[in-house]
Amino acid sequence: MGADGGGNMFTGVCMPYGVVKLGIDILPPPGAGDAYSGYHPDGRVNGFSMMHESGIGGSPKYGVVSQYPVIGALDNPLADHGVSRAAPDEAALGWYKASLQGGITVELAASHHAGIIKHTFHRATTNISAAGNHVIVDVSHHLHSFRGQGIGQNYVEGSIKANTNGYEGYGVYNGGWNLGKLTPM
């Protein structure tokens, strides 16, 4: 039922009939199975992505275009930057909050056509002022299936370009139960 025990329900924020389903993505611990709609009660947070599905069954789907806050040096943005939660997640109608180890809080909200992500870096940056705070935007991010049945999703190609107003781009994913190009940015 719900998100626990293979319930396959999306945990995050959205508006009725909205195009954004913004939520947390968690890498389950080894041997714990899949995080079907991105959520798992245990494991490490490895992103906050803009598109999820509920009631998917079968295999994880979407979890695409991830944003992930990082404190300190960012030598390789594609390295595993996942961390555990520092406190239980909080949620209310239209709002979701995750507190991450290392002193970062991420709050999510959604409108019909946009996701709103607020990153708060609580940890004092005096010792790492040269390294700074970063937000990784990864178009290759997607939810993985660890069952080895060939029903997982795959990243095919994508592009991202930053400009003075933010960023824009696209990602192409295949596998799972569809094939197609998503442009959620």
Image (cartoon, helix red, strand yellow):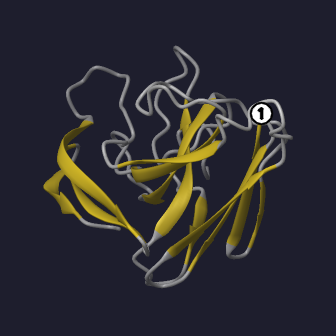
Q: 86 or 4: nearer the eye?
A: 86
- Where is residue 178? Give x, y as percent: 17, 53
Secondary structure type for disc 1:
loop
Q: Residue furthest front?
A: 130
Q: 51 or 33: nearer the eye?
A: 51
Q: Quadrant of the C terminus?
A: bottom left
Q: 153 or 66: nearer the eye?
A: 66
Number of other residues with Cα within 10 Å of mark 1, as a class: few under 14, some 14 to 19, many 20 or more? some
148 vs 29, left or right, is: left
User: Residue at 45% of width from left, 72% of height from top?
Assistant: 20
User: Residue at 58% of width from left, 20% of height from top?
Assistant: 29
Q: Is residue 106 visible to us here?
A: yes
- Where is residue 16? Give x, y as percent: 51, 83
Against 85, residue 95 (above or below) is below
Q: Residue furthest top?
A: 31
- Where is residue 41? Give x, y as percent: 67, 36
52 vs 104, left or right, is: left
Against 121, residue 31 (above or below) is above
Against 31, residue 72 (above or below) is below
94 vs 24, left or right, is: right
- Where is residue 71? Give x, y as percent: 68, 37
Against 148, residue 88 (above or below) is below
Q: Is residue 173 visible to us here?
A: no
User: Residue at 22% of width from left, 53% of height from top?
Assistant: 159
Type of amino acid at the residue the image marks with label 1: Gln
Q: Which residue is mark 1?
A: 101
Q: How many marks?
A: 1
User: Residue at 42% of width from left, 72% of height from top?
Assistant: 164
